[in-house]
Amino acid sequence: MQQQISVITLGIASLARSRAFYSRGFGWTPVFENDEIAFYQMNGFMLGTWVNPGLDGDMQRRSEQVPSAYCLAHNVADKADVEPAMQQLLEAGGTLLRKADAPPHGGFRGYVADPDGHAWEIAWNPAWAIDERGLVTFGV
């Protein structure tokens, strides 16, 4: 099987609230949306936000079932970009989970939750290159 991700879809409570967060916080514009779902073109995959219970129904999963903790990440090119990016997300309706600091393994990161509680790590990792297209490459 090819090693790739096509779509990550997040269950949300309100399309308008979610769209405002991703548009104002990250500056992203949906490439498609209807009354239930919005898709954002990412670097080689799509990020979807789908109003529940639509997503849960599509998966035939009860809404009260939740997965283990997970986090999405948005890496930035410079350490100095972490805190301004986090502040922009907070001003767009996000919730601070952890102030930016340096983890023991290196780099600089903090955590913000979107209005539906999905955790986003905003990180700078000196060992990860980000090219002009925004693609991240693991390298040491």
Image (cartoon, helix red, strand yellow):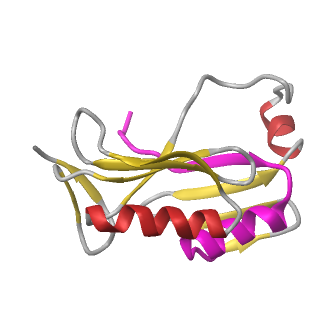
> Is 14 part of what is drawn in magenta?
yes
- Quarter of the image with the N terminus is top left
Q: Residue 2's spot in the image, x, y percent?
A: 36, 39
Asked whether the viewer can see residue 43, the reply is no
Residue at 82% of width from left, 36% of height from top?
56
Closer to the camera in the image, 120 or 111: 111
Closer to the camera in the image, 18 or 96: 96
Q: Is residue 108 left or right of residue 55?
A: left
Closer to the camera in the image, 123 or 16: 123
Place residue 24 in its image quadrant: bottom right
Residue at 59% of width from left, 64% of height from top?
89
> Is 7 part of what is drawn in magenta?
yes
Place residue 22 in its image quadrant: bottom right
In the displayed orientation, state which residue is furthest to the left.
140
Residue at 18% of width from left, 53% of height from top?
126
- Quarter of the image with the C terminus is top left
Q: Residue 47's spot in the image, x, y percent?
A: 59, 57
In the rendered view, would you say 56 is above or below 19?
Answer: above
Magenta-drawn segment: 1-30
Q: Residue 55's spot in the image, x, y percent?
A: 80, 43
Q: Residue 121's spot in the image, x, y percent?
A: 47, 48
Number of numbered markers? 0
Place residue 75 in its image quadrant: bottom left
Q: Is residue 116 left or right of residue 23?
A: right
Q: Is residue 9 left or right of residue 44?
A: right
Asked whether the viewer can see residue 78, the reply is yes
Residue at 76% of width from left, 70% of height from top?
33
In the rendered view, would you say 55 is above or below 24?
Answer: above
